[in-house]
Image (cartoon, rainbow, N blue to C red):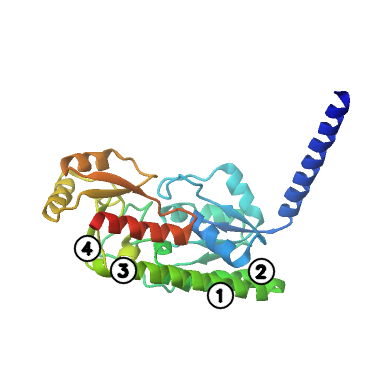
C-alpha cells in the first residue's frame, strides 16, 4: 500500500510540474485585450494560441452594465493592443481608465470605416449605444470580414515572424465567413421582409444584411414604457408574431408579460456566443422555424 501511495505522489508531482510549465509557457506569450467573447474567437482564428487573450467582459455579463475588476485593470498593463468594438457603452465608460493603465498599448477601434447603423436619436442609453450608433457589428458577416483584415494586420505587426501562418489562417477564416454568409442567405432567401420582435435590438446588422425587419421591446435603452409596450403588442397581434427573442444578459420580466399578452413564447438568443459562425447560422434557423 505504501508503494502505491509513493507512485501516486510521484504522478501528482509530475502532473503539477507539467501544468506549471505550461502556465509559465503561456505567460511568455504577448498579451492582447478584447472587449467581448466573439472578438476572442476572431483573434484565435487568425493567430491560433500565439497570444494570451484577455477578455474584458466575461461570459454572462452585460456590456451595458459591467464594471471592470481591479485584477482586470492591473492585467491591462501587459497588453500590447486593445481591440475595441467601438460604440459599446462599457468601452466609452472605461476607455480613459484603460488607456491610463497602459499608455503604450495600441487601441484599435474595429468600427472605424464601417457602414454603421445610425439614427437621428440614440436608441440606447449612453452606457449602451453612443451617438445613436448600433454597436453590434460582430453579428454581420460582411462587417466581420472587413474588420478581420485590421485584426490580422495588427497581429502580424506584433509577431512578424509568424506572418505567413497568420495570413493563411486569415484566408481560411475569410472562407469560413463567406460560407457562413452563403448558408444564411440561402436559408433566409424566402423570408425577405419578414418581421421579428426582440427585447434588446442586437440583431440590427443581421436584419439589414438579410432583408429582415427587427422591432425591439426595449425602448431608448430603458425598460419599455406602457405606451411602447402597447405599440409593440399591437404590432405582434396585427402581424401574428408569437415570439419574442431575448438575450440571457437581460431581465425576462417584460418579455414574460409580452408573451402572456400576445399568447406567445420567449426564445433565448446569444449574440455574445464565442462559436461565432455556428451561432449566426443557429439564429437564422431559429428565426426561420418561427416564421413558419
Kindly report which numbered mark, 2 or 4, lies closer to the viewer in this rendering.
4
**CB contact under 8 Å: marks 4 and 1:** no
Q: Badge 3 is on which residue?
A: 210
Residue 101 percent across, percent down from the top left: 60, 53
Q: Secondary structure at mark 2?
A: helix
In the rendered view, would you say 166 is above or below 96?
below
For the residues labelled 1 and 3, the Cα–Cα distance comes to: 24 Å
Q: Of residues 280 and 23, which is closer to you in this image?
A: 280
Q: Of residues 76 and 34, which is closer to you in this image?
A: 34
Q: Secondary structure at mark 3?
A: helix
Kindly report which numbered mark, 3 or 2, lies closer to the viewer in this rendering.
3
Regarding residue 223, the answer to whether it shows in the image is no
In the rendered view, would you say 3 is above or below 189?
above
Q: Badge 4 is on which residue?
A: 194
Q: Badge 2 is on which residue?
A: 158
In the image, farthest residue toward the top: 1
For the residues labelled 3 and 4, the Cα–Cα distance comes to: 10 Å
**CB contact under 8 Å: marks 3 and 2:** no
**Mark closest to the chain's N terminus, 2 or 4:** 2
**Mark closest to the chain's N terminus, 4 or 1:** 1
Residue 99 percent across, percent down from the top left: 56, 57
**CB contact under 8 Å: marks 2 and 4:** no
Q: Secondary structure at mark 1?
A: helix
For the residues labelled 3 and 2, the Cα–Cα distance comes to: 36 Å
**Mark closest to the chain's N terminus, 3 or 4:** 4
In the rendered view, would you say 107 is above or below 35?
below
Q: Badge 1 is on which residue?
A: 171
Residue at 43% x, 57% y is 279
**CB contact under 8 Å: marks 1 and 2:** no
Q: Secondary structure at mark 4?
A: loop
Amino acid at each position: 500500500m505504501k508503494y502505491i501511495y509513493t507512485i501516486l505522489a510521484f504522478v501528482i508531482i509530475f502532473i503539477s510540474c507539467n501544468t506549471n510549465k505550461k502556465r509559465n509557457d503561456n505567460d511568455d506569450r504577448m498579451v492582447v485585450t478584447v472587449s467581448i467573447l466573439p472578438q476572442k474567437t476572431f483573434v484565435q482564428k487568425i493567430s491560433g494560441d500565439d497570444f494570451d487573450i484577455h477578455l474584458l467582459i466575461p461570459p454572462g455579463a452585460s456590456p451595458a452594465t459591467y464594471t471592470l475588476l481591479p485584477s482586470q485593470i492591473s492585467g491591462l498593463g501587459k497588453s500590447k493592443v486593445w481591440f475595441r468594438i467601438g460604440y459599446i457603452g462599457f468601452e466609452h465608460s472605461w476607455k480613459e481608465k484603460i488607456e491610463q493603465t497602459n499608455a503604450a498599448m495600441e487601441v484599435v477601434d474595429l468600427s472605424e470605416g464601417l457602414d454603421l447603423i445610425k439614427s437621428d436619436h440614440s436608441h440606447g442609453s449612453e452606457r449602451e449605444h453612443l451617438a445613436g450608433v448600433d454597436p453590434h457589428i460582430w453579428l454581420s458577416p460582411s462587417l466581420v470580414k472587413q474588420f478581420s483584415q485590421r485584426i490580422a494586420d495588427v497581429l502580424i505587426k506584433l509577431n512578424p515572424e509568424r506572418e505567413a501562418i497568420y495570413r493563411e489562417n486569415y484566408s481560411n477564416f475569410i472562407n469560413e465567413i463567406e460560407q457562413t454568409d452563403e448558408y444564411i442567405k440561402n436559408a433566409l432567401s424566402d423570408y425577405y421582409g419578414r418581421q421579428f420582435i426582440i427585447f434588446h435590438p442586437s440583431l440590427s446588422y443581421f436584419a439589414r444584411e438579410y432583408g429582415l425587419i427587427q422591432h425591439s421591446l426595449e425602448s431608448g435603452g430603458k425598460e419599455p414604457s406602457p405606451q411602447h409596450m402597447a405599440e409593440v403588442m399591437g404590432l405582434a397581434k396585427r402581424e401574428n408574431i408569437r415570439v419574442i427573442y431575448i438575450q440571457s444578459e437581460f431581465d425576462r420580466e417584460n418579455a414574460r408579460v409580452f408573451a402572456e399578452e400576445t399568447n406567445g413564447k420567449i426564445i433565448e438568443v446569444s449574440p455574445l456566443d464565442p462559436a461565432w459562425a455556428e451561432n449566426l447560422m443557429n439564429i437564422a434557423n431559429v428565426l426561420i422555424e418561427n416564421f413558419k
